[in-house]
Amino acid sequence: MIIKREYVPFWKLKVDDIEAGEIFDKAFNESFANYEGKEELYQRFMNLSLYQREMDWAFHKIGDIVDGFEKLDIEKPYDNGFVFSDVNKIEIAWKDEESIRLHLINKFEDTELIVKVVELERDRKGE
């Protein structure tokens, strides 16, 4: 299924999408060039996705990743290789008062990968 790269863990992008991996590595190396625990930090980031944004506080080049992924999503949409039958978990995330976001997830053992994100907006007809 086609999905925005922001929902895909960095480790999976590094395996499946060379250009996205290069964008991440460049921004990471520029952000943490002189950091002593760089390798350990890199490994911790691999399990995150841009959507989680847990690294924003320390990652001063995060904007480069956001911009690079958005550009790639337009030019070369990312197909994660999943189909609807791979979905075995659904999470609801409120986007705002007017809409929700459904995360269709493939859960296998301790790993959860977002397969597809569906946004639903409130129907205001008849109010």
Image (spheres, rainbow, N blue to C red):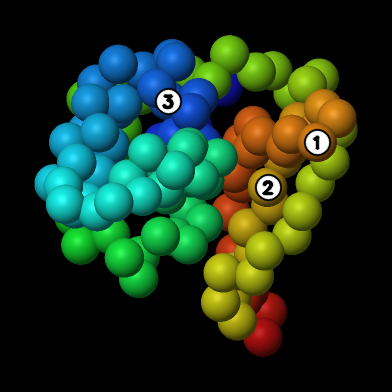
Q: Mark 3 near mark 2, Cβ–Cβ under 8 Å?
A: no
Tell me the residue that label 3 is attached to.
13
Residue 45 locus on image (x, y percent): 45, 45
Pair 3/2: label in front: 3
Distance Cα–Cα, label 2 vs label 1: 17 Å
Compared to residue 13, the image places residue 99 above or below, namely below
Label for residue 110?
1
Compared to residue 94, the image places residue 52 above or below, namely above
Distance Cα–Cα, label 3 vs label 2: 18 Å
| Badge 1 amino acid | Asp
Q: Earlier in the sequence, mark 1 or mark 3?
A: 3
Q: Is residue 15 left or right of residue 92?
A: left
Q: Residues within 10 Å of mark 2 (few under 14, many from 20)?
A: many
Residue 30 locus on image (x, y percent): 13, 46
* Residue visible at 60% across and 81% down in the picture: 97
| Badge 3 amino acid | Leu
Q: Quadrant of residue 76?
A: top left
How many discs appear? 3
